Image (spheres, rainbow, N blue to C red):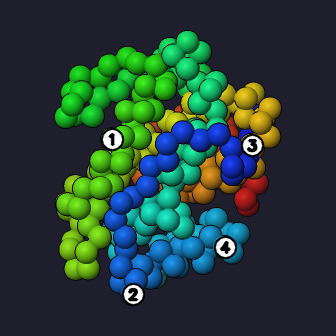
Amino acid sequence: MEPYFSFVSGSRSSKTFKPKKNIPEGSHQYELLKHAEATLGSGNLRQAVMLPEGEDLNEWIACVFFPAVDFFNQINMLYGTITEFCTEASCPVMSAGPRYEYHWADGTNIKKPIKCSAPKYIDYLMTWVQDQLDDETLFPSKIGVPFPKNFMSVAKTILKRLFRVYAHIYHQHFDSVMRLQEEAHLNTSFKHFIFFVQEFNLIDRRELAPLQELIEKLGSKDR
């Protein structure tokens, strides 16, 4: 695998998805977000992903979809920098190298997995994730409202699918990213993402296979 990448803000970006809900200041979730922001600022990503002592795992995982961490918007913006190179013609299937191909299904509008281009897959994905984040029954923002029993399952599916965007960028558009000199933030973003999912075993190892060599390299550099 080729060397890994960085992202520079201000590059061409497509639409940016943002959670519509506001976390009430002074709420427990707000305090968790502040903690996440502070630990990220320390520069130690291994420490930043660890569950704070005495905290609820569901709440901590929900934090990664809101400002301060927000893997969703990070990935969306990273992809936005290379959309002109990721087209129906250049990427007729959603793939991560020659061995891995992804078909889209959301279980509601598209129940049977369909083969589609990478830009179409990623558009389906980003829209679907936004719908999950906006669903108050899945991601409650009101104080005292519990997470549903299926929260962890949904969160794992979101993260698994977001990983596929990283995998597609690294495998199919690495040269474009290098030409744009957008390696540093992508490396940091992916490293934070992968440390987080590994810390809580949120993505099956088999799903991580397309970037396994990179993951091992990032982990060894952090030891």
Q: Give the amino acid type for the residue marked by disc 4 in the picture.
A: Gly
Alpha carbon of mark 3 to alpha carbon of mark 2: how far?
A: 36 Å
Closer to the camera in the image, 118 or 101: 118
Instruction: Assess disc 2: are there few (<14), some (14-19) or many (≥20) residues with their C-alpha within 10 Å of its C-alpha.
Output: few
Give the residue number, with chain letter if any, for mark 1.
128
Q: Give the amino acid type for the residue marked by disc 1 in the picture.
A: Trp
Q: Nearer the viewer, mark 1 or mark 4?
A: 1
Quadrant including the N terminus: top right
Alpha carbon of mark 1 to alpha carbon of mark 4: how far?
A: 30 Å
- Quick check: 204 left or right of 87? left
Q: Give the amino acid type for the residue marked by disc 2 in the picture.
A: Gly
- Residue 208 vs 41, above or below: the answer is above
Does residue 19 appear anywhere in the picture? yes
Labelled disc at residue 34: none
Location of residue 2 by image quarter: top right
Q: Give the amino acid type for the residue marked by disc 3 in the picture.
A: Glu
Labelled disc at residue 182: 3
Alpha carbon of mark 3 to alpha carbon of mark 4: how far?
A: 21 Å
First of labels 4, 2 by sequence position: 2
Q: Nearer the viewer, mark 3 or mark 4?
A: 3
Secondary element under disc 3, as helix, strand or loop, is loop
First of labels 3, 4 by sequence position: 4
First of labels 3, 2 by sequence position: 2
First of labels 1, 4 by sequence position: 4
Secondary element under disc 2, as helix, strand or loop, is loop
- Quick check: 104 left or right of 163? left
Give the residue number, with chain letter if any, for mark 2.
26
Give the residue number, with chain letter if any, for mark 4.
41
